[in-house]
Image (cartoon, rainbow, N blue to C red):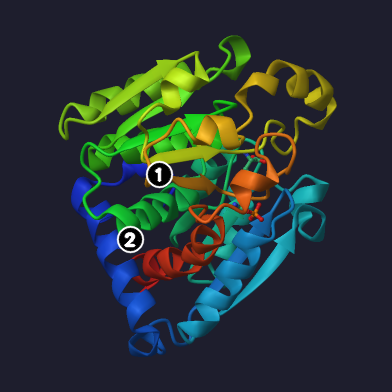
Amino acid sequence: MKHLTSIHELSHDELQEILRLSKEIKAYPQRFRGALAGKTLAMIFQKPSTRTRVSFQVGIEQLGGSGFSLGQNELQLGRGETIEDTARVLSRYVNGIMARVFSHDDIIKLATHATVPVINGLSDLLHPCQGICDYFTMQERFGDLRGLKVTYVGDGNNVAHSLAYGAAKLGAHLVISTPGGKYLPNETVIATARKDAEATGATIELVTDPVQAVSGAKVVYTDVWTSMGQEEESKQRRKDLAAYQVNGALFAKAAKDAIFMHCLPAHRGEEVTNEVADHARSVIFDQAENRMHTQKAEMVLLMG
Ligand code: CP
Ligand code: NVA
């Protein structure tokens, strides 16, 4: 494993190894105290972040290494230095680069030109660290992921795409429910995930009716209706996605032991009500915590 740009790029064994190591690191963090001693992670943020920033920073420190964040305007990138040269230069100083970018193309350019591992900390297309953390969290709850019915409700965005790639590699039964049109997930991502799914028996279904989609699901997942960079569309999105709110009535259609998941940040009262976000079967904060454990595993495997 050279980089972590997309779950699709991971082999089945690599993904299983990340999940296995995450479990070990979470259970025995002290065993890994020196795993990345002397190693440095540079973190580039073109967009805001709470979880990704803090979980990577604390994670690398717990592994004995160090990390620092760079905002877009703190780098010469903001004044026109190319992403390619930024990748080449940072590679001379640090042992790994984590980047949160607008265009997924920037992740590809970083990975192509860096000589150190590059981790995608969210792009407009994908959020692989989130997807890995999400399946780790489901595994903690349900064990085997094969055949597990996971329903994602709302906007077919970066988080939905990484859930699709993860389902395909792990054999889950993913249903994505959107109003259609521009809210549908990316066609190429879904086609690629369905191809990957042939090896595992996974299924990726696109469904319009949220009630039908959630029926019998073990996991009900949603994300914000307006992703970072789409703020101008927020009014229209609230209107178009209103019927896709995960509220008590919709959550009640899922399996009796279903869990609620959200990558956070949540816009309570929009895509999810307080009743569901704070439900006894909501695992949103376990999920947030697990970002750190799974990313520690990713860093150990990539930078160790
Ligand atoms: N879920 C997630 O990536 O959160 P942040 O935007 O706070 O990093
Ligand atoms: N879809 C959201 C995820 C935030 C973690 C966004 O891109 O803003």
Q: Quadrant of residue 214?
A: top left
Q: Is mark 2 within 8 Å of ligand 1?
A: no
| Disc 2: which residue | 140
Q: Quadrant of ligand 2?
A: top right
Q: CA distance from mark 2 to mark 1?
A: 13 Å
Mark whose residue sits in front, 2 or 1: 1
* Residue occupied by mark 1: 258
Alpha-carbon neighbours of circle 2 within 10 Å: few (<14), some, or many (≥20)?
few
Residue 82 in view in this figure = no
Relative side of 113 to 57, left or right: left
In this picture, residue 55 sits left or right of residue 164: right
Q: Residue at x 25, y 42 (%)?
A: 170
Q: Is residue 94 left or right of residue 270?
A: left
For the residue pair 176 and 278, the one nearer the viewer reads as 278
Residue 207, by quadrant, is: top left
Q: Amino acid at mark 1?
A: Ala
Nearest the eye: 68 or 28: 28
Q: Residue at x 22, y 38 (%)?
A: 171
User: Could you tell me which residue is drawn at 39 percent across and 22 percent down?
Assistant: 190
On the image, the x and y values in percent for residue 74 come to: 80, 61
Disc 1 on helix, strand or loop?
A: loop
Three-letter amino acid code at the position of disc 2? Glu
Q: Secondary structure at mark 2?
A: helix
Going by the picture, which residue comes out furthest to the top?
181
The C terminus, quarter of image? bottom left
Q: Is the CB–ligand 1 distance for label 1 below 8 Å?
A: no
Determine whether 213 is above or below 295 in the image. above
Question: How many badges with numbers are in the image?
Answer: 2
